[in-house]
Amino acid sequence: MPSINRVEFGGTVLIDLTKDTVTKDKMYKGTTAHASDGTVITGTAEITYNNGVLIMPTGLCTPIS
């Protein structure tokens, strides 16, 4: 079955993933989502703890300002 990234019904857009920016390297390992092309992706980002420091990949979260 082909991937679907946009669904229209009666001229109304019901689902549109074409501008989504999620990538598997920015999602927690094991979580799933749909990429902008409609394919299912599985997260690969891991959070580790080293010498009292929590280490997260860049872009996994947005700093609060």
Image: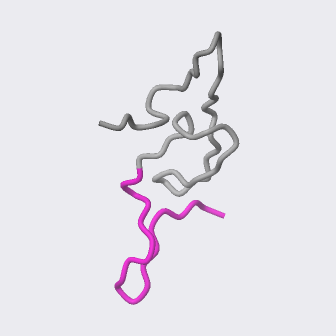
Q: Residue visible at 38% across and 77% down?
A: 13
Q: Quadrant of the C terminus?
A: top left
| Pick the front one: 2 or 18 | 18
Vertical order, 11 against 35 (above or below): below
Is 34 located above or below residue 12 in the figure?
above
Left or right, 26 with respect to 14, comes to right
Write down the region rendered in magenta. Answer: 1-20
**Residue 17 within the segment the image draws in magenta:** yes
Q: In the image, is residue 38 part of the stretch drawn in magenta? A: no
Picture residue at 45% right of the left edge, 71% below the top: 15
In this orientation, which residue lies closer to the viewer: 34 or 55? 55
Which image quarter: residue 43?
A: top right
Horizontal and vertical percent position of residue 40: 62, 52
Q: Position of residue 5 (x, y in %)?
A: 48, 62
Q: What percent of the width, then of the height, locates residue 11?
A: 34, 85
Query: From the image, which quarter does the N terminus lie in?
Result: bottom right
x 35%, y 38%: residue? 64
How many numbered discs? 0
Which of the pair 46/21 is nearer the observer?
46
Most extreme residue toward the left is 65
Scheme by which the image is coloured? one colour
Toward the front, the furthest residue is 52
Horizontally, residue 6 falls left or right of residue 32, namely left
Q: Residue furthest bottom?
A: 10
**In the figure, residue 27 lies in which quadrant?**
top right
Question: In this image, 12 relative to 31: left or right?
Answer: left
**From this viewpoint, which residue is outermost toward the right?**
30
